[in-house]
Image (tube, grey):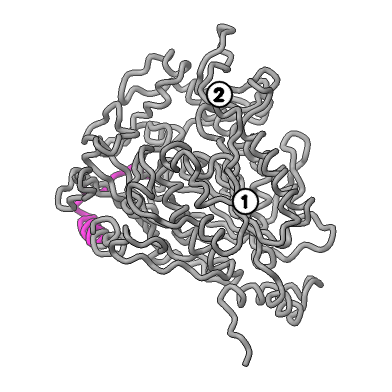
Amino acid sequence: MSRKWSFAEALLAVALTCCVGHGQLGAGAARDFVRRKGKMNVLLIIADDLRTSLGCYGDPIVKSPNIDQLASKSVVFKNAFAQQALCGPSRTSFLTSRRPDTTRLYDHNSYWRAHAGNYTTLPQYLKMHGYFTLSVGKVFHPGIVSNHTDDYPYSWSIPPFHPSTQKYKNAKVCKGPDGKKHANLVCPVDIEEMPERTLPDIQSTEEAIRLLKSVKSLESPFFLAVGYHKPHIPLKYPKEFLKLYPPDKIPLAPDPKIPPKLPRVAYNPWTDLRERDDVKALNISFPYGPIPDDFQVLIRQSYFAAVSYMDTQVGKLLSTLDEQELANNTIVVFTADHGWALGEHGEWAKYSNFDIATRVPLMFYVPGMTEAFPLPGQRMFPFINPFTNKVGKLPKGLTRDVNVELVSLFPTLCQVLRLPRPPRCPASSFHVDLCTEGKSMAKYLHSDAKNSNHESIAYSQYPRPADTPQLNSDLPLLKDIRVMGYSIRSVDYRYTEWVGYNASTFSANLSDIHAGELYLYRTDPGEDNNLYNNIEFAGVTQKLSTLFKTKHFTDICFA
C-alpha cells in the first residue's frame, strides 16, 4: 500500500510537474524527487525596523534590486503584520509562535523561559528534528530578552555570531557640520574611518557566507538565521549610498501632520530620536513639536540609503547561495521584526499599532514550488550592484493580499518542511512547551492558491504608561504599563481599543476603554481619519469590538 503524501509533498509535486513545459522535470521525476529528496535547508533573513519600503512592494523611490530579485522568485505577502512594533517582543513572538500576552514580554527586560513558560522556539524545534542551526547577527533580541546567550544552547547548534563592531552602535563616529564627531541619527560614514574599518552588517554577511561554505558539506540539513541591523537607527551606512537618493527627489510623508482625531494615548513621541545629538540640536518641543521639513528629508534620505545598503548585503548572501549550489535545496524567507514611521501622522520610529509600524515585508522562496528548480549552472540570485548594474523591470513573483501574521511563521515552515506541525495552543498555554498561536500560511505558497483576503484578520498590540504622551510612552517598563492598545487589522478596517491594563496580574480590563480608533481602508489607507466616534460607523465599531472579544485571540490575551 502506497504512503499518503503530505500537503507539502503534494504541493511540491504539482509544482515540479508544472515544470514539464519548461523542459525541466516531468511528473515521474517530480514524484521521484519528493520521495528521495532529504529535508530542505532554510535561510531566514531578518531586517531590523524595515517597513515595506521596497521596490517589490511598490515603493517608487527605494532601490532594493536584490530583495526585489528574491521577491520575483517567491511568494510575497503584501499584508503581513508583526504582533508588537518593538524588536524584542516581536522577535520572541514569531520565534516561539506565541503572542506577546503569552510571552509576557512587552519591553526588553525579561526572558520568556523564566518569566512566562519554557516555550520551544522555531530553531530549537528544527534542531530537535535533525537540523544544524546557526545564528548570525540580530536574530533574537540581545540581552536579557534571550538570556544574554541568544537562547543558546536551546536554539542553536553552535554559539551565535555577533559582529564585533556592534559595540560602537552609539559611538561618536558621525561627522557633523562642525567637523567634530557626534552620536547622530543621520550618520553616513567613510568605512575606512570606522572602528575596525567595517560595519556590523558587513561583518554579518562575511560570517554568513563563511558558514554557508562550511555547512554545504554537512550530511544534515541546516537552518541559518541572519539578522541585519539596518535600517535600525542610528542610520549609519557607507556614505556612497547617498548618491542613490538626491535630496530634491525625497518627498515628505504624505500625511506629516498629527491627525486631529488621534487619541493622545495612540501617539508615540519618538523619544529615542530626541536623544541623538543632531536631533537634540534642533531643540524640538516635547511631545508634539514637529521636526523641520529639511531635517525630515535628511532622515528619510538616510533611511532609504540604509535600506539600499542592507539590500546589497542580502544580495551578496544570496549570490553565495547560488555559488555554493544551494539555491536548489534551500528555502529562503525574508522578513522584518516590524515597520518604522517616517513622518506619517507626525510620528517617527515604531511604537504604535498603525500599519506603518506593524506591517512588514514577508516572502518565501521555495525551490520547485515558488520557482522552478535552477538548471545546472543557472544563477538564481546573481548579485545586483545598485551603482553599476542597470536593473530592468524584474518579473513579479506570486503575491498574496491575505492578511497574515509573523506569529504564523513557525507552523508554516514546519508544514513546508514536512515536519509535524505544532498543535494549536489551548486558551491558556503557559504550561505547554510546544504549540502555536499562529496559523500555517503554507497553502498560499502554491501557485494556484486563492488570493482572497476575505475576513482574514491580523492582531497587534502596544502598551502605554498613561493616556497622554510621557517620556516613557514609547518603551514603558512592564511595571509602568497602565494601558494596552489591542488592534485588529481586517481587509476593510483597522480597529483599536485602548483598555486598562494591570501589569502585576498581566490582565486587561476590556470594559475599561480609554480610547478607540477605527479607520476605513477604502477611503483612508493612511489611517488619518478616526471614525471611532462617528455615529454612521457605530454598527461597525460594535461588530469589531465583539469580534475582538470573542475570537481565539481573546482566549490567548485575556485568559
Q: Quarter holding the C terminus?
A: bottom left
Magenta region, residue range: 527-546
Distance, label 2 to label 1, CA atoms, is 25 Å
In the image shown, does 221 or 382 lie closer to the viewer? 221
Q: Which residue is mark 2?
A: 168
In this rendering, would 266 be left or right of 211?
Answer: left
Label 1: element kind: strand
**Amino acid type indicated by mark 2:** Tyr
Which residue reaches farthest left?
511
Q: Which mark is residue 457?
A: none
At 77% from the left edge and 74% from the top edge, which residue is drawn?
Answer: 25
Q: Is residue 517 visible?
A: yes
- Measured along the vertical axis of the image, is residue 268 above or below residue 14? above
**Outermost residue toward the top in this view:** 178
Residue 545 in the magenta stretch? The answer is yes
Q: Quadrant of residue 555?
A: bottom left
The structure residue drawn at horizontal position 66% and vertical position 76%, both measured from the top left corner, is: 13
Q: Are the residues tagged 2 and 1 within 8 Å (C-beta)?
A: no
| N-terminal-most mark, 2 or 1 | 2
Which secondary structure is most common in the magenta stretch? helix
Q: Which residue is mark 1?
A: 224
View extreme (right): residue? 377
